[in-house]
Image (spheres, grey):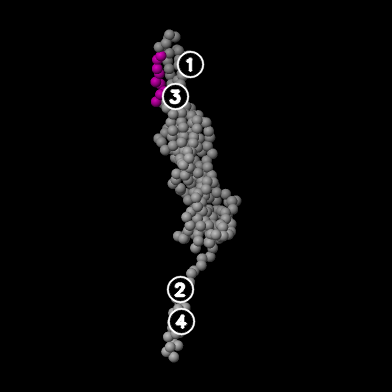
Amino acid sequence: MALNRILAILAASFAALTLAASPVTTAPNSGNAPVSNEQVATPTVPVIVGKPQGQNNLTIAFVDQALKGNDSTLLTPQGNLTERYAYSTYSIPYKVIEEGNDIIGPREQDSFLCSAPNGGTTTIVNPVEVRANVQIQSNVGIELRKLINLVWTGQTNGSFKHTYSKAKVYSAPESVHNHRDYYGAIQYDLGTTVVNRTDIYHVYIGDRILYTTSYNHDQQRINVKVPKAVEYAKDFYL
């Protein structure tokens, strides 16, 4: 009798331990909301999905107030000539993103796009947009800033924006046990802008312009951080 009672108690204890150790399964997330879960794979390498469209071979004219009014007198066989400042120009003959400078970071504006269940597909429900501006890495004047912004983004303020398409279909392979979340973000390239400056002068004899002359400054190389839109994913396994 006592032996049967002991055996019954042991059997009940073993059943309780087995139940406590049983794994808990998590249902796949098929919704369009990010899931907070520490058990995720390393994010995939970001893929470029949008870049600003700049302009090439631009020149801008401006008046440098520091040079205006500083006339020079030239003594020539024709008589006294006056060299008078007229205006200046900035031109950008080329720009380049050199190899190895295409992902310099920091990545910012990480925005949730959608969540695809394993073996399934989904699309973006709500519109997602990222915005950023060119970041000029030197102290430059207003006119040159406008020109640099134009050659990289086509906008004088250097602005760039990208809207992620609601028509694009996102998927997760069956090898992803739970779901795959997609994110959009801003990343940066390091670009080099080559700048030429020329000062233009009119040479007068009396009140008549005799000819025009120009003076070139040393060529400048100005670095800029150029924004672009990227997309990456995280795989959830629990």
Cα separation, mark 1 vs mark 4, equals 110 Å
Number of the front mark, 1 or 4: 4
**Residue nearer the viewer, 52 or 103:** 103
Number of the front mark, 1 or 2: 2
Residues at circles 2 and 4 in contact by the CB criterion of under 8 Å: no
Which picture quadrant has residue 13?
A: bottom left
Residue at image mark 4: 11
Residue at 44% over, 22% down: 215
Q: Which mark is residue 117?
A: none
Taking 114 as reference, is 70 left or right? left
Residue at 49% over, 36% down: 96
Q: Indicate whether 146 appears above or below 23.
A: above
Q: Which mark is residue 211?
A: 1
Identify the mark nearer the N-term, 1 or 2.
Answer: 2
Residue at 50% over, 35% down: 151
Q: Which mark is residue 20?
A: 2
Identify the mark nearer the N-term, 1 or 4.
Answer: 4
Cα separation, mark 3 vs mark 1, equals 17 Å
Residue at 51% over, 46% down: 229
10 Å crowding of disc 2: few (<14), some (14-19), many (20+): few
Q: Which residues are magenta?
A: 66-74
Residue at image mark 3: 216
Callout 1 secondary element = strand
Identify the mark nearer the N-term, 4 or 3.
Answer: 4
Q: Amino acid at mark 4?
A: Ala
Residues at circles 4 and 3 in contact by the CB criterion of under 8 Å: no
Identify the mark nearer the N-term, 2 or 3.
Answer: 2
